[in-house]
Amino acid sequence: MSTGTIDAQILAKMFLSGAKNLELKKEWINELNVFPVPDGDTGTNMTMTIMSAAREVSSLSSVTTDTLAKAIASGSLRGARGNSGVILSQLLRGFTKAIQGKKEMDPIVLANAFEKAVETAYKAVMKPKEGTILTVAKSMAEKARELVILDETESTDMKDFLRQVIEEGQATLEKTPEMLPVLKEAGVVDSGGQGLMTVMEGAYNAYMGKVLDMDIEPARPSADRSAAVPQTAEADIKFGYCTEFIIMLEKKFSDADETEFKGFLNSIGDSIVCVADEDLVKIHVHTNDPGLALQRALTYGSLSRIKIDNMREEHQEKLFKEAEKLAAQQAAEEAPKEKKPFGFISVSVGDGIADIFRELGVDYLIEGGQTMNPSTEDMLNAIEQVHAETIFILPNNKNIILAANQARDLVEDKEIIVIPTKTIPQGITAVINFVPEKSAADNEASMTESIAEVKTAQVTYAVRDTHIDNKEIHEHDIMAVGDSGILAVGQDVHSVSLEAVREMVDEDSELISIYYGEDYSEEDAEKLAEELEELYGDCDIEVNAGGQPIYYCLISVE
């Protein structure tokens, strides 16, 4: 195929093929992680981000550049996970801004879209680093601009244009080890850049007619919310039809509209869930007359993915007690609550860590961390649940900070402050340093200052052989990953932990905290603490049950 333009239908196929190609190769991309830890997740994060958008695209009843752009931008924005996923979502967001209103896209339009994508992504990253996905994207944008400038007097062949842009991106990807020494030492290219090129490869293959299996599950209303809707036994069902649908908005859906529509649904049913964003509204309601709900919804836009179930036929008596519990829980959550001045959301992993955050007054915990980075939508859902004027978010992982910032920028009715905590111990220290009597700005300053004093070692095992930070690492070795590199490598958790602490402790250190995980016993943690007490008598030593997976222990020094 060789033409001068592509339309929305072709672009949709290219996007879905790119998403599918990334999904198929995500584990390979995960293995490109610089540190050989058992939770390399770039491929997973990028896949979950783009598949969120792919589900929206595959559910479109009418594909135009406008509907396609909205589906890609909205789906990827809310589904973004991890730094690589957030950057990918911003690349897609910028790209789609430039194609809106275009019935067909020639190389000039695509060159503009590539440039807008890069501009948007760079703005989203506070300190852009070259040798990453950003550099790979920028090189393709520059090549696209070069090509259309060279050929501005004649029609540019689309096939050659796409091929040369992708070849430029691949060439830049292969140079990333020369741009980032840590990549060269580990013997890998940048994993985020590889993920982006995997998407581009799939898209180009689709353009050339080599389409992958495009079986993508359609988007659904938020699973988190709908899963919380109570189910009851047949005998006690007041409203018999579980009704779900999505309104594709054709006009502005204001806060007043949302309140009015919820009031109407409440008059004809219960168990109401109404989740609105800029382009669509997701609805769940139990009612005896689904037609009334659908009829009123049509006044706001067209309807999609309508699902009506007769609960009296489906429910089983054994679910009754569980349903009562869930219904009471939902009623408590939905009851009007007076907003308090401050609230906290923290990312947490492990039962022990969760208990510590709760004891410190954190309002809402998001289960996540290194093994599963929460999405932007997970953050937005959490923000909805915290009734406070100002909400502090503790990402507790450097790979979650961008998603938290993205959620912050989408919220208008609350003040959201992201404290850039990169580890669980930093998050704990930040909460401890919060003072209710201080202003939000003063607390932000003092909490941010306090986390700079926290050094953290995360002790785990290596999943492959590599050489990094001047250390030879073999598969199954025990290693301690510090704030900026590998602190220690050895054969057992105890000796590696001691060496890691030795690297972190200095004359100003006062406290050493150990959070032992699910694969490290309390007895072993206490033995480690005893030896640390002998070595560092001037420091207080604390031992806490963390319960975290993968990491035998988290150790902080402050």
Image (cartoon, rainbow, N blue to C red):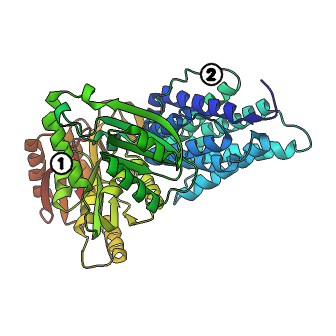
Where in the figure is residue 41, as x and y percent of width and height?
41, 38
Q: Is residue 40 visible?
A: no
Establish if 277 lies above or below 303. Answer: below
Residue 421, picture quadrant: bottom left
Q: Secondary structure at mark 2?
A: loop
Side of 457 where 144 appears, left or right: right
Upstream in the sequence, badge 1 or badge 2?
A: 2
Disc 1 or disc 2, which is closer to the eye?
1
Side of 233 where 251 appears, left or right: right
For disc 2, the marked residue is: 211
In the image, 196 versus 359, the foreground residue is 359
Where in the figure is residue 173, as x and y percent of width and height?
61, 38
* Mark 2 closeness class: few <14, some 14–19, many ≥20 residues within 10 Å: some
Where in the figure is residue 297, as x and y percent of width and height?
47, 46
Side of 451 where 88 appears, left or right: right
Establish if 216 lies above or below 354. Answer: above
Q: Name the residue rendered at 33%, 36% in the picture.
A: 242
Alpha carbon separation for disc pair 1 and 2? 49 Å
Q: Secondary structure at mark 1?
A: helix
Tag count in the figure? 2
In the image, 281 versus 183, the foreground residue is 281
Name the kind of residue labelled 1 in the image.
Ala
Residue 139, picture quadrant: top right
Where in the figure is residue 476, as x and y percent of width and height?
29, 30
For disc 1, the marked residue is: 328
Establish if 1 lies above or below 12. Answer: above
Name the kind of residue labelled 2 in the image.
Val
Establish if 296 lies above or below 319. Answer: below
* Mark 1 closeness class: few <14, some 14–19, many ≥20 residues within 10 Å: few
